[in-house]
Image (cartoon, rainbow, N blue to C red):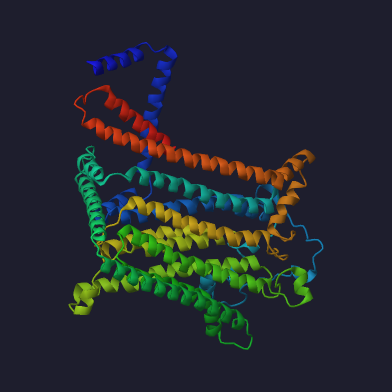
Amino acid sequence: SSFSSHLDCQQADIKYLSGWKQWKRTSSKSLKKVLNEVKELLSYLELWRHDIHSIEGKFGTGIQSYFSFLRFLVLLNFIIFILMFSVITLPSIISKYGIFNSSFAKIPPKNIEPHCTVYKPSGNKGLVYFYTYLKDLFSGTGFLKETSLFYGYYTIDTAWLSNLSYNLPLAYLLATFAYLGLSLLWIIKRSVEGFKQNLVRDEDQFQSYCNKVFAGWDFCITDPNAARLKHRSLQYELQTDLEEERLKQKIADRTMKEKLRIYSLRILINIIVFAVLSGCFYSIYRATVFSQENSNDISNTNFQVNLLLQYLPSMVITLANFIAPQIFSFLIRFEDYSPAFEIRLTLMRCVFVRLANIGVLLFSLWSQISYCATDECKACGYNYELYPCWESAVGQEMYKLMIFDFIIILAVTLFVDFPRKLLVAHCSCKPVQWCGLQEFGIPDNVLEIVYGQTICWIGTFFSPLLPAIATIKYFIIFYIKKISLIHTCKPAARPVRASSSNFFFLVVLLIGLVLAFIPLGISIAHIPSSKACGPFRSFNTSWAVVPDTILGFPTGLQQVLHGIASEAFAVPFFMVTCLIMFYIIALAGAHKRVVEQLREQLVMVRFDPLVCTPKVFIVVSVIRHAEEQQFL
């Protein structure tokens, strides 16, 4: 009776709402309905929607999360390409060819030695063989060096369209900051969404089983194929839960002798991993030094040998990136971790190999670029003889790494995966059958695309159209991996949960983005810009365009900007930001404790004989409100 009176009061309140509140509530419901319909309509236009759902049903949500991650990178690179093309490439092409009565201006650098401004790209002249074009296509030299693909093409200070001027150096720098900021915000947004899902799913296992068994089915499904896919997806989820529970029970039942054995084995395996990492880093360092010392040797006239020496660092890096993850994936099996933790640990080990390899290469290049033994070289600030346009040279290295990475992925699929499938299917030899079909290695495949994306982030400053190549590359890789998964792989023996994997994939991608900030920051703010090419040839560094632009602002605005950049503003701003962050962390912890207390109270209420009292509904509503506040 008390509950019915409570509902009557609520209905009475709704009935006697003012006209404004009724209209506001009705409008809010209508707007939510329209937004839900639009969102549902857009979901049908989502890239690879059917393919990813099919993969989820056949191979589980763990592998599905990899393909969703790949789709995210395709969209991210496409948007970065649109940004760089519209802000940098398009104004340069329009002004150079005089489209729409446009023009451009080149301001000769001031107070610069003449020998620093000499840059003559070695393009192909006369009769050119086909293999020369092929070599240029794979290495970024020859005819590609003079195109808009690389930094050296954009030797324009100002573009004019009628009476409007376009500051290309400032636009180039701002576009770089824009694509890095866009990537950071988008990754953080997706990471926060994944973190919320992890918090929601971090619940009692019995409750998780009940949700999947009794509330996991979508009763709106009418298509038999969709129903079959959903059934398989739920089956993989339950299988993953049971596998994790089995491992937890196994860990809890370990004796002291078994613990000593497994910990000793893990220590030994980590020593082996450290040795593999050290060997990879040293091999790349020696290969890079050997290549730099011998590739410019004029006494070496053998074309094939020179080509091998030029590409030796890229080849060694690619070889290390291919061999080391295979070793780590083999060793992780003996450490007896859960499937989700296996992925995380293997990814972190592979991150050190792949991303540190890029750092070793860039460090070697910068040491060569910055090495000056003569006064003429010191006047330029960089090695102008070997690198008259050093930004294009770095762009070529990033371009070669991206092309080589794609070739390796394609070659492994064609010459390793498919022959292995044929051998297992048609050869009854015991060694072949013991190897069996391969499983789809999520850590290896994620590291492949994170490595390629890090190269893209670093190389976009030196090669503005590199995101277009990355978009095409990942688009093709999606179908390569899909075909390889369906025709050459078997379902995983130990299923993997997607909820934790998605979040960790983005964390690894964020590590790659942070790594990209370091070389780009050094290139923009520390290393002198080339004086013979590029939009920053009139400035000492690329960053110098910012204070030069600020000098053209009104005096009042200049003082405001200088005040924001001063320590007097930065230190208090940092302290206030830290206080706000600590407050939010403390508030989240308080909300979490309140939710836990309310859950305990709800369990106690279940044993109350007056179950149908409004107290139950009040507690439930408070719990929901607290959870919403926790995730805000």
Quadrant where the image shows the C terminus: top left
In screen coordinates, is 422 left or right of 545?
left
- Identified at 65% across, 43% down, the residue is 572
Quadrant where the image shows the N terminus: top left
Q: Quadrant of residue 6?
A: top left
Image coords of residue 620 (percent x, y): 31, 30
Image coords of residue 324 (percent x, y): 41, 72
View extreme (bottom): residue: 299
Q: Quadrant of residue 39?
A: top left
Image coords of residue 528 (percent x, y): 70, 64
Choose between 169 and 190: the one closer to the eye: 190
All told, the count of numbered labels is 0
- Identified at 72% across, 53% down, the residue is 545
In screen coordinates, is 147 left or right of 60?
right
Choose between 121 and 295: the one closer to the eye: 295
Q: Is residue 118 visible?
A: yes
View extreme (left): residue: 428
Image coords of residue 565 (percent x, y): 70, 47
Choose between 486 and 492: the one closer to the eye: 492
- Identified at 38% across, 35% down, the residue is 594
